[in-house]
Image (cartoon, rainbow, N blue to C red):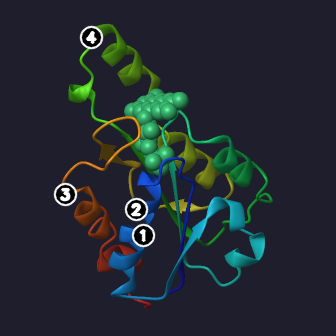
């Protein structure tokens, strides 16, 4: 099974998570990790599984990721497994209680990404997942690259790899 991980990243943390996910999957099957800016729709040809990730910025994915997904033709993800991840700040690391409430209520990028992926016909095989940064510009919290590498397991990839 061919797998594609598409990501956007401002400070490099989501890129590290995408790379770790790719390394984890690469043990089992063919995988390409691609920056959103270099994505083209030809990459969907023969694809079995599409994973999309973004930093959470203002509760949402970056405009690049939103536009990439909006521009996918209707039903272009039909027959393709999909999953979404984001990077975000752990709620308990936000000291201000009002800000913590706002961030919690606002939500995170992986959920709208998952929704857009399924709206284009993709089959969501995992709940939206978040990976944690220690501060606005990073670094990733301890253990997150390892968690990312193990996020997609062999059974999720299916038996045809
Ligand atoms: C303008 C801005 C808005 C942000 N909004 C959120 C947010 O709504 N929720 C959250 O958990 N983190 C938020 N963050 C922290 C980002 O999630 C963090 O910068 C990101 O995970 C880093 O990933 P990157 O290095 O790939 O850009 C925000 C950061 C910036 C700079």
Q: How many marks?
A: 4
The mark found on residue 143 in the picture is 3
Q: Read off the residue under disc 1.
A: 19
Q: Earlier in the sequence, mark 2 or mark 3?
A: 2
Element type at mark 3:
loop
Q: Nearer the viewer, residue 150 or 13?
A: 13
Q: Is 7 left, or right, of 17 in this rendering? A: right
Residue at left 78%, top 57%?
Answer: 74
Q: Residue under circle 4?
A: 97
Contact, mark 4 vs mark 2 (Cβ under 8 Å): no
Task: For marks 4 and 2, give the CA distance.
Answer: 30 Å
Q: Would the CB of label 1 be found within 8 Å of ligand 1?
A: no
Judge left or right: residue 73 versus residue 10.
right
The residue that appears at 55% across and 79% down in the rendered structure is 48
Say which residue appears at 68% left-offset and 48% top-offset: 64
Which residue lies under the disc numbered 2?
16
Rendered location of residue 32, percent (x, y) = 54, 79
User: Horizontal and vertical percent for residue 113?
Assistant: 56, 47
Some atom of ligand 1 lies within 8 Å of the CB belonging to the residue at label 2? yes
Disc 1: CA contacts within 10 A as few (<14), some (14-19) or many (>=20): many
């Amino acid at each position: 099974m061919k797998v594609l991980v598409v990501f956007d990243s401002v400070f490099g943390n989501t890129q590290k998570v995408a790379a770790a996910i790719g390394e984890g999957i690469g043990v089992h099957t063919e995988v390409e990790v691609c920056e959103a800016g270099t994505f083209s729709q030809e990459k969907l040809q023969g694809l079995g599984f599409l994973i999309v990730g973004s930093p959470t910025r203002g509760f949402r994915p970056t405009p690049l990721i939103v536009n990439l997904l909006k521009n996918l033709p209707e039903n272009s993800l039909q027959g393709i497994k999909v999953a979404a991840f984001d990077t975000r700040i752990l709620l308990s690391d936000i000291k201000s209680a009002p800000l913590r409430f706002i961030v919690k209520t606002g939500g995170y990028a992986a959920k709208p990404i998952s929704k857009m992926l399924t709206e284009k016909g993709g089959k969501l095989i995992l709940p939206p997942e978040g990976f944690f940064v220690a501060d606005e510009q990073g670094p990733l919290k301890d253990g997150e690259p390892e968690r990312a590498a193990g996020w997609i397991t062999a059974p999720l990839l299916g038996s045809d790899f």
